[in-house]
Image: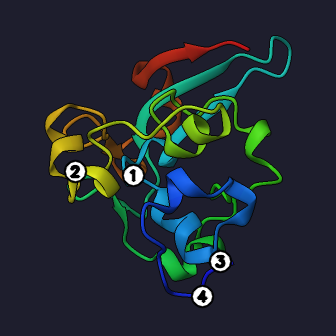
């Protein structure tokens, strides 16, 4: 395993997910903000409604958490993606680096680790920039008006 803060060269191609350091695991996140969108699961069908409503902490322009170190204290339902629970997050988009690598696929060419910045990802419309609104701007009773997809297993 690499040093705590060090990123090994092209680590995503050379090492399995379970061999990554904490810093490398974090660096895999492309910063699209999709995991910060509100999701509502139907308990009967198991379907998940994905909304264009983002967590109150998500800066919808940069697609970054405004208080990443304290997110779990401020947002109890915040997504904590780990190697162990990765299979539970079947709603992750096919573009997600964690999902892609777990499925044996490569990172997309627009991924910031390959492209050098997040700008290509934003230009390609992968991120929630320009489509997400903060949950502070939407009443819960209006959530049905913000459904953008129904995800099925």
Q: Earlier in the sequence, mark 2 or mark 4?
A: 4
Please say if the residues under marks 4 and 1 sit with CB atoms less than 8 Å apart: no
Mark 2 lies on residue: 115
Q: Secondary structure at mark 3?
A: helix
Query: What's the mark number on residue 73?
Result: 3
**Who's the residue at 49% across and 49% down the image?**
36
User: Pointer 1: residues within 10 angstroms few (<14), some, or many (20+)?
Assistant: many
- In front of the other: label 1 or label 2? 2
Q: Earlier in the sequence, mark 4 or mark 1?
A: 4
User: Pointer 2: residues within 10 angstroms few (<14), some, or many (20+)?
Assistant: few
Q: Secondary structure at mark 4?
A: loop
Query: What's the mark number on residue 68?
Result: none
- In front of the other: label 4 or label 1? 4
* In the image, residue 1 above or below residue 108: below
Q: How many marks?
A: 4
Mark 4 lies on residue: 4
Q: Secondary structure at mark 1?
A: loop
- In front of the other: label 3 or label 4? 4
**Who's the residue at 67% across and 39% down the image?**
102
């Amino acid at each position: 395993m690499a040093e705590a803060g060090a990123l090994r060269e092209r680590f995503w191609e050379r090492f399995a997910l379970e061999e990554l350091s904490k810093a490398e695991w974090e660096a895999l996140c492309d910063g699209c903000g999709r995991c910060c969108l509100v999701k509502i699961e139907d308990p009967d069908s198991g379907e998940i409604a994905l909304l264009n409503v983002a967590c109150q902490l998500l800066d919808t322009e940069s697609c970054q958490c405004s208080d990443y170190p304290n997110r779990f204290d401020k947002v109890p339902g915040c997504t904590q993606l780990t190697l162990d629970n990765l299979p539970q997050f079947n709603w992750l988009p096919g573009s997600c680096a964690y999902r892609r690598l777990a499925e044996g696929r490569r990172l997309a060419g627009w991924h910031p680790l390959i492209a050098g910045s997040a700008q290509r990802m934003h230009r390609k419309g992968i991120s929630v920039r320009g489509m997400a609104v903060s949950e502070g701007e939407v009443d819960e009773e209006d959530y049905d008006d913000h459904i953008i997809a129904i995800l099925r297993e």
